[in-house]
Every structure is written in C-alpha cells, then in structure tokens.
Image (cartoon, grey):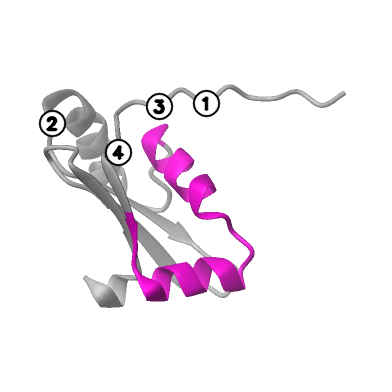
Amino acid sequence: MNQSTRLKPLFHPGRLLVTPAAHAALHTHGIPVISVILQHVCGNWGEVPDDDKRQNDLSVETGLRLLSCYRLSDASRIWVITEWDRSATTILSPDEY
C-alpha cells in the first residue's frame, strides 16, 4: 500500500527564484523545482554540515538566513537560500553565489 507523507512547512519562503543554471541542472536531472522547495521549507537541509543544520534549525525560530544544499546524480550541487526576512528563496548553483 502506498502511504503518503504529509510535509509540514516550517516557514514561508517568500518570492521563489531560480537561476537559469540551477533550472537547467534540475531539468537535466528530472527534478521538479517544487520538490526542492518543499524539501527546504520542511527542514530537510540536504548535505550541509551538522553545525549548519543546527544553525538552520535555530534560524527558523529566530529569523535568520537559511541554506540547504542538495547533491544531484552527477555529483554537482544545488543551493537553496532563504533570506533572513523571508522575502525570497533562491535556488542556484554554488558557482553563482
């Protein structure tokens, strides 16, 4: 039987932005943009160090910037950054930072 998991957003992402390079990478790997956003806003921070995960968890409560990092199948990475004021969340490649 298929069981669905209810995702619980931890914060509002604000305006959603995707850079052209990140969009192309996600498209190449067949990953929908919405799935990356959902992982991020639900607190799956991906492949960031434990200290950064703890900082993100604290930042959800205190209103600081949030950073997630997800590895693609070709070992490249995609970053997701939400601004401290929750005005915008951007998906980008690390080279574009």
57 on left or right of 75: left
User: Quadrant location of the N terminus?
Assistant: top right
Return the mark for residue 13: 4
Determine whether the residue tagged by mark 4 lies in a helix, strand or loop: loop
The reply to whether the magenta stretch includes residue 30 is yes
Secondary structure at badge 1 equals loop
Q: Counting residues from the N terminus, which is met first, the one under dot 1 or under dot 4?
A: 1
Kindly report the distance in space between the C-alpha atoms of the residues bearing marks 2 and 3: 15 Å
Disc 3 and disc 1 in contact, CB within 8 angstroms:
yes
Locate the C terminus and report the quarter of the image it occupies: bottom left
Which of the numbered marks, if any, corresponds to residue 9? 3
Q: Which amino acid does label 2 sit on?
A: Gly
Q: Residue 39 carries which label?
A: none
Q: What residue did someone put label 1 on? A: 7
Number of the label disc, if any, that sits on residue 63: 2
Residue 56 pos. (x, y %): 24, 38
Task: Give the spatial CA distance, label 1 vs label 2.
Answer: 21 Å
Q: Which amino acid does label 4 sit on?
A: Pro
Q: In whole angstroms, how far apart are the C-alphas of marks 1 and 4?
A: 15 Å
Q: Give the range drawn in magenta.
A: 17-43
Front position in the image: 24 or 52: 24
Q: Say which amino acid is labelled 3.
A: Pro
Tell me what residue is drawn at x 26 percent, y 75 percent.
96
From the viewer's perspective, is residue 49 above or below residue 94? Answer: above
Would residue 90 be found to the left or right of residue 31 on screen?
Answer: left
For mark 3, does the 10 Å Cα neighbourhood hold few (<14), some (14 to 19), or many (20 or more) residues?
some
Residue at image position (34%, 26%) is 10
Amino acid at pointer 1: Leu
